[in-house]
Amino acid sequence: MASTAKRITETLAKGAPRPASSYVIIYDTELKGFGLRVTAAGARAFVLNYRAGGIERRLTIGRYPEWSSAAARKHAEGLKRRIDVGDDPMAKRHEDRAALTVRELCVLYETRHLPGKSPASRRDDMAIIRKIVLPRLGSLKAASVRYADIEDLHRIVSQETPYRANRVVALLSKLFTLAIRWEVITTNPAKGVQRNPEQARQRYLSEDELRRLLDLLVDHPNRTAADAVLLLLLTGARRMEVLSATWDQFDLIEGVWTKPSASTKQRRLHRVPLSGSAIELLEKRKRNAPGASAVFPGRDGETAITDIKKFWASLCRAAEIDGVRLHDLRHTFASTLVSDGANLPLIGTLLGHTQAQTTMRYAHLFDHPQRAAVERLGSSIMALQRKGSR
């Protein structure tokens, strides 16, 4: 490296000779520290040398000819004014480069936060991150993401899947809340984004639908998937609680299923009784696969299956059932309990709810038994009235 001193003009910037090797810096004779760097390959750029906190720094303003000599000089003058009042432009640039991008923040989320969630939640979160968050926000600095960015993303996703759009905002809100805790950012840009209204699903299998479904399940050749659906119906468990179940969770003598906290949504151990029908189903499965640890193993005979959506879709088509998700079997379980006289606290306990308000979604199912009760009351009272009028 060599250096010379001349007034930097457009003519100089264009015609300064290349050095034989490395680079040379031509410093301006009027604006201290302002210079033109010329490399052996012919690349030219304007620079500014300055001292901040006792440290010598060199900042690259921009390449020539994208920057003219006049524009570079004017910018250098502005930088020197900032330096004179204690600013350090190079340090700010280093901070910006060191700041995490949304993509890097998602990696932290995956490694620090996701291990504590259920397998199903981890899959859902990663699907949202890969398919929605990263394509739109991944390259942005986490600190530069604005409320408008999140609102725009929510609006775009809402055009196709309104409920999914709400899940995206919920995930981003959690992501940025954690980023504040990790001291990556100071504010949450997802806070306050208005979400789409959601109506709780009230879909249950009718007696006729349930009968058609059971007729197909009893003799279905795919016993693993068919038995998994049957256990969903008999226990009201969540899909992944059933699919990931292992034999060490079941006491078939006592008739109890102890779900570990790692597999439940509330992250709490959940102990539930099993009906005789459920025990019979499980005992048969165990006799047919005595060496497996998974109750519903996949093709390798050991690892648990992870999805039966295609099986469920084909089953519904064959049974001529529309608009029913696997999760609606849980609702059907609750509605059947109501019809058999169970109360809301008992239903909540069996379903593993930790808050009474969660179970209240089933309160409307009591309309029919309550009406029947008041009808019986009315009939009794009127019978007394008729008896007294004789």
Image: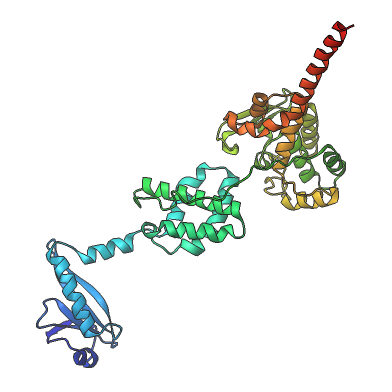
User: Which part of the image, by quadrant, shows the N terminus?
Assistant: bottom left
Q: Quadrant of residue 330?
A: top right
x%, y% of residue 39?
25, 85
x%, y% of residue 268?
56, 32
Q: Residue furthest left?
A: 30
Is residue 131 something one can see in this rendering?
Answer: no
Identify the residue shown where x is 77% and y is 25%.
371
User: Which part of the image, by quadrant, shows the C terminus?
Assistant: top right
Identify the residue shown where x is 63% and y is 31%.
360
- Residue in front for this viewpoint, 299 or 318: 318
Q: Residue furthest right?
A: 390
Tell me how the rendering is colored. Answer: rainbow
Is residue 107 something one can see in this rendering?
Answer: yes
x%, y% of residue 387?
87, 8
Q: Left of 365 or right of it: where is 217?
A: right
Considering only vertical position in the picture, is 118 above or below 161? Answer: above
Q: Left of 61 or right of it: where is 177?
A: right
Identify the residue shown where x is 15% and y is 71%.
80
How many numbered marks does the figure carry? 0
- Residue in front for this viewpoint, 371 or 249: 371
Q: Left of 324 or right of it: where is 131?
A: left
x%, y% of residue 198?
60, 46
Considering only vertical position in the picture, is 331 above or below 46? Answer: above
Considering only vertical position in the picture, is 204 above or below 75? Answer: above
